[in-house]
Amino acid sequence: MSSKEDILRKYRANVREQFPMPDLSDLQAVHYDNPLQQFVEMSQSVGARVVPLAEGQTVEALVKTLYPDAREIASNLPEVAAIATRNPDTVVSAEDLNGTDVGVIRGEFGVAENGCIWIPQHMQQRAVCFISENLVILLPKSQVVSNMHEAYRRLRTAAAHSGTAAFDAYGYGTFISGPSKTADIAQVLVMGAQAARTVTVVLLNA
């Protein structure tokens, strides 16, 4: 039993009173006629850059154009294998990814209402998602849902079909929306406070 499961077991054992889940059947979720356009606008509003992959252009060429001074590029994706200098599947520990200029990862689907992208852990060291100075997320432009209700419904469906959690083999996934940011101090918005300083979403024609 993992430490997480042990903690949850102790919580469940000490529940004194239970309440039924609220009825959300009448909840009106927002829907968009053009989810992709809304996703682009929301992503930009939270500080991300959205770039469509041009016809005939490779992801490797685009990354080199966007980050010409990058020396350390971390990724396990075949689209950037020729330029990646670090592989989060083969490094010894997460610390070996420290100093990564650009991390390139794959998003599964985007959410139009808030610019979030669902990213299951496709790599052994998920630190690449957070330790990279600049993060590039590959996202098929056809994979955008309108709202978080649709997003979680999609995750539940994936879990039901696989018989496990919708987090792939590593048991972890996260939503990322734009670069790291905080406004805790003096209500001044600071980008890149805890994780990536910049996030670029590359829209693929898949």
Image: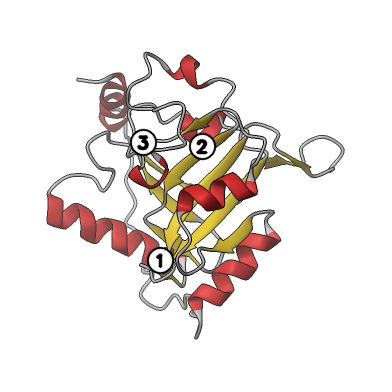
Numbered circle sitting on residue 42: none
Residue 14 found in image quarter: top left
The amino acid at mark 2 is Gly
Looking at the image, residue 109 lies above or below residue 90: below
Which sits in the foreground, 142 or 157? 142
Q: Which residue is mark 2?
A: 103
**Residue for point 45% across, 55% down:** 58
Q: Earlier in the sequence, mark 1 or mark 3?
A: 3
Q: Which residue is mark 1?
A: 149
In the rendered image, the quadrant that contains the N terminus is: top left
Q: Looking at the picture, how far across and down is residue 149, in whole percent?
A: 40, 66
Crowdedness near tag 3: few (<14), some (14–19) or many (≥20) residues, C-alpha within 10 Å: many
Tell me the distance, in whole angstroms, between the alpha carbons under discs 1 and 3.
Answer: 30 Å
Tell me the distance, in whole angstroms, between the alpha carbons under discs 2 and 3.
Answer: 10 Å
Tell me the distance, in whole angstroms, between the alpha carbons under discs 1 and 2.
Answer: 29 Å
Q: Secondary structure at mark 3?
A: loop
**Residue for point 39% across, 28% down:** 87
Residue 194 horizontal side relative to residue 35, left or right: right
Foreground tag (1 vs 3): 3
**Residue for point 84% across, 43% down:** 187
Q: Earlier in the sequence, mark 1 or mark 2?
A: 2
Q: Secondary structure at mark 2?
A: strand
Which residue extends farthest right?
186
Q: Which residue is mark 3?
A: 76
The amino acid at mark 3 is Asn
Which sits in the foreground, 147 or 142? 142
Crowdedness near tag 1: few (<14), some (14–19) or many (≥20) residues, C-alpha within 10 Å: some
Q: Would residue 7 be visible to someone looking at this image?
A: yes
**Residue for point 69% across, 42% down:** 181
Q: Would residue 177 be visible to someone looking at this image?
A: no
Q: Earlier in the sequence, mark 2 or mark 3?
A: 3
